[in-house]
Each structure stands twice: as structure tokens, then as C-alpha cells.
Image (cartoon, coloured by chain):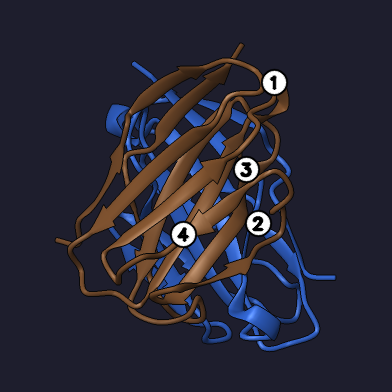
Chain colours: A blue, B brown
Amino acid sequence: GDSVTQTEGLVTLTKGLPVMLNCTYQTTYSPFLFWYVQHLNEAPKLLLKSSTDNKRTEHQGFYATLHKSSSSFHLQKSSVQLSDSALYFCALSDGSSGNKLIFGIGTLLSVKP
Amino acid sequence: EAAVTQSPRSKVAVTGGKVTLSCHQTNNHDYMYWYRQDTGHGLRLIHYSYVADSTEKGDIPDGYKASRPSQENFSLILELASLSQTAVYFCASSEWGFSQNTLYFGAGTRLSVL
């Protein structure tokens, strides 16, 4: 069945360094990928989304490119800030039965001074 | 900005007791969802609804019921709360189905079953 894999549970970085959070997926249908961000004690919010192959999507300094050939949608930022510390979820929708949105387990990003 | 409000924000319940979590949205969205968040499992769908007076099972519906009395309101009911239902619960809404659509989440309800 459909699935989303986020390999890092915790990523700890120093402010100003680049980051890449991994997301791979499995589906037999046409995928629509999302990144949601959840700051401490807040609701998850959409960060960015894409269904277009090989096109970079950007929002708030974060960017991701959907690569259907490798089934990946990694989230990147060139210079992390303290305020980027949060839980990041990758999610998959493929429009198949029930229009279900499948979330990965999340990656906690901790940015230190 | 879309608005989804949940109540209560936190609750302590006893095993075997009944718990009702409430959700209200002012987005005029047709779709509403209940998710459960546990460390190591991410967000998992419990129930959802796309029209008033109708609900659908999600991926983990066992032990939960849902009620959608109006477009704005969606409740999650635990008839016999169990220890394993200790978690954070999120309600969300979207204009239509998941595909290509943004989910707007509430702030969550932290439920502890003792």
C-alpha cells in the first residue's frame, strides 16, 4: 500500500547551516506531496506542496522538488534559523480510494545558537 | 486565516469513562477530520466527514465514534476510554478532499487516560 518514509527522527543543527530533511514515498498512483510544520504546542500548518515532477517549490525560505523517478520530496533550506526548530511532516495524497492523506512519522529539527 | 477550534485543550479521563472531544470550524469547509498524534507514528486518521450527518472511518477507527451534526461541528467520542487512547488529538478541515487540498488544523487536545 501507499506509504511515506522519513528516515531521520531528530536533526540537530547550528544556526546558519543548511538542512535537508528526507522524504520518500510509495504509491502506484499519481502523487501529491506536502510538507507540514508543527511548532511546539501549536497546530500543524502547511509549509509547501507539489504534484509537478522536477519543479522546485518554495515557501518561507524552504524548498522542495518532487522527483517521481526516485519517489522523493526532500525539504531543504540553505540557512536554518532558531525559529525553524519544529516537527516537520511529509505527507502523500494520491487521489485514490477515500482521498486519504498519509503522513510520515515526522522529523524533529532542533536548531542551536 | 482559516479557523478551527478544539475543546477542551486538555483532558484527564478515567479508564472506562466516556470522553467527547469537540471541534468547530468557521471556514465553511465541507471536509472535517480527526487525527491522532503519537510519538513514532506521526498523524493517523481516525474518522472524517464530508457532509453533515455523515461520517467515514479512517485508518484507525476502532474504539472511536464520530458525529457531524452540522457543517461547522465535528465531535470525536470515546465511549469506553482506554489507556492506549492517551494521545494528542487534532481536528482539521479542508475545502474538499485531501488531494491538492490544504488541511487547516486546530490547536489539538491532549488526552490522558488514567
What SS does tag 4 mark?
Answer: strand
Q: CA distance from mark 4 to mark 2?
A: 34 Å
Q: CA distance from mark 3 to mark 1?
A: 19 Å
On residue B72, which mark appears? none
**How many residues crowd around disc 1 within 10 Å: few (fewer than 14), some, or many (20 or more)?**
few
**Residue located beneath label 3 in the image:** B42
On residue B83, which mark appears? 1
- Name the residue: 61% across, 85% down: A95
Disc 4 residue type (three-letter): Ser
The quarter holding residue A84 reads top left
- Name the residue: 35% across, 32% down: A16
Q: Is residue B26 left or right of residue A90?
A: left
Q: Is residue A13 left or right of residue B73?
A: right
**How many residues crowd around disc 2 within 10 Å: few (fewer than 14), some, or many (20 or more)?**
many
What SS does tag 2 mark?
Answer: loop
Looking at the picture, how far across and down is residue A44, in whole percent? 39, 47
Comes first in the chain, label 4 or label 3: 3
CB contact under 8 Å: marks 4 and 2: no
Disc 2 residue type (three-letter): Cys
- Name the residue: 32% across, 29% down: B9
Q: In the image shown, does B26 or A43 lie closer to the viewer? A: B26
Q: Chain of mark 1?
A: B
Mark 4 or mark 2, whichever is nearer to me:
4
Q: CA distance from mark 4 to mark 3?
A: 24 Å
